[in-house]
Amino acid sequence: MIILGLNAFHGDSSACLIRDGQLVAAAEEERFRRIKHWAGFPSQSIAYCLREAGIGLKDVDHLALNQDNRANLWRKIAYLARRRPDPALILQRLRNRRKRQGVRELLETAFPQDSFRGAVHNIEHHLSHLFSAYYVSPFSEAAVVSIDGFGDFSSAAWGVGRDGIIAVEGRVHFPHSLGVFYQALTQYLGFPYYGDEYKVMGLAPYGKPVYLDHMRRIVKLLPGGSFELDLRYFRHHQEEIPYQWQNGSPEIGDLFSPELETLLGPSRRSDAALEDKHRDIARSVQAIYEEAFFHLLEPLQNRAGLSDIALAGGCAANSVANGKIRRKTKFSRVYVQSAAGDAGGAIGAGYAAWQKFGGKRSFLMDHAYWGPQFSQSEIARLIDARRTEIVESECTIEDIADEGELCRRTAASVTEGKVVGWFQGRMEWGPRALGNRSIVCDPRRADMKAILNAKIKRRESFRPFAPSVLDSAVADWFEEDDAVPFMMQVFQIREAKRAQIPAVTHVDGSGRLQTVYRNTNPRYYRLIESFRDMTGVPMVLNTSFNENEPVVCEPQQALECFLRTKMDVIVLGDTLITRRNDVS
Ligand SMILES: [Fe+2]
């Protein structure tokens, strides 16, 4: 049985292909379209998944979408009847609904030479999130939680997964939403773009939670683990929030109301300086998010008595809160797959359909390498075509077929403070580069963050960089020890170790680690081993291979990024290109 799973018409559009219960391919549309968070119909991701599986659309039995307009329909009708919102809001929703109904037509347009004869299934948004977390996790029994902005009129859902079956125990419905709260306050703090919430999370440790009481007025915790918003501070429930949500990157108007500025003072313009007040608000936002998060998790753990938890939804990207689960609750293992947000809903919808047709749960997602890969001969052709340009850029080109030697040479460059592009194997699924489309640097250098920002990244100075750590070394370097293959938990670095790795130690002593395993990424593991052998430090700084664009997908994009920036070294498969006369 072949199932195509889609997240379409949402930010982070994506596709995945499941063959007889095993994931074959998964990718986000932004990587092909080269527009961050691309929202629309993911035709290029679909084309890639079919290519990877060596099949055509005609061979697909089922197509599963992570949305179901009929879900919570009575609730929607009751809400509309009660609240009488702006007719423009209703019209906008109807327009979106119409767009979503034409999947077969969109497939016909995108694939005129092929034909889809299978069935289309609409899987409710949060059920898709829950499946995307639990169904591919290593747990036979686990609590499972989904928290996001909104999808199909809900903003959170939770329950228990047992032997492949998910029993939903509770939900939070529109207009109450932790995701909208976090997004609204992110906008208030002057970070206007879709997906900017992680900047607030990064800023939070620089402030004090002095606005926590204000936040408690905005987010109210309810008995039993649920929560609600004081809607006076928001606009989304009664006005049309302007957004561009089709064939481009998502842009969203302000979600907060003037009442919020009465409570907290004027919002920050995106070009205004960051002041202590903004840092304090960021800290308070993160603090109330964690209060609500643990308010939800604790009773769930008590009721179910389980030791494992799987998380999904946009808020599952809050790696700081995730990293505190083991300390603050009785849960001892946490699983958050690499595409925890809406992109991952493609996988959840796909597996919900698989189960619906009697499929057994037999797939574990223990790595993120489900995207396109390129052979050494394709890389060689690219280098040949661009050889003159590369050489004229003062670079030397070497092919090093011996993997040990390639890793040693690369690790040596890292120890010299060089910024190294590392392009290998299949592209990662989800927003993080996890050792195949990565830039790696020396975590021991206090100036590495400044060097990286000057040469390529140009990030806000408060944002941290993250370490990729050999799995066996986590307990020695961090206060927690769990599998974190997708960089979805932040742990405290042991105090005695922090001074050794300043480039990946955040201001509060934390680090957003990736645990690296020999069996799922042997080459990346070997690179870090080589670095450890030279330095005694079993980790490298890892950031995504890109420059203000989606993470690179093809070798050509990686090479172009290398040539237009001041990156010192690039490793494309077995090819090592080094810029001469570089200044570190
Ligand atoms: Fe979602």
Image (cartoon, rainbow, N blue to C red):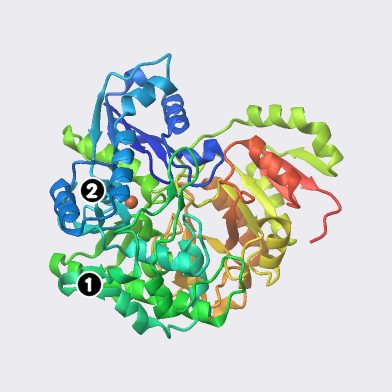
What secondary structure is marked by label 2? helix
- Say if 82 sits above or below 386 in the image: below
Crowd rating for badge 1 (residues with CA inside 10 Å; few <14, some 14–19, many 20+): some
Q: Is residue 116 visible?
A: yes
Mark 2 burial class by Cα count in 10 Å: few <14, some 14-19, many 20+: many
- Percent x, y for residue 375? 59, 30
Q: Say which of 95 and 447 sits in front.
A: 95
Nearer to us of marks 1 and 2 is: 2
* Residue at position x 16%, y 58% in the image: 82
Ranked by sequence position, the earlier of labels 1 and 2 is 2
Could you tell me which residue is drawn at 76 percent across and 39 percent down?
Answer: 398
The mark found on residue 298 in the picture is 1
Residue type at mark 2?
Answer: Leu
Q: Is residue 38 above or below residue 146?
A: above
Image location (x, y in percent) of residue 419: 70, 56
Q: Report whether the residue tagged 1 is closer than 8 Å to ligand 1.
A: no
Q: Nearer the viewer, residue 171 or 551?
A: 171
Separation (CA) of disc 1 from disc 2: 21 Å
Task: Find residue 411 and report its horizontal and vertical position in percent.
Answer: 68, 55
Q: Secondary structure at mark 1?
A: helix
User: Disc 2 designates what residue?
Assistant: 127
Q: Quadrant of the C terminus?
A: bottom right
Q: Considering depth in this image, is 248 or 84 the residue closer to the camera?
A: 84
- At x 58%, y 51%, the residue is 526
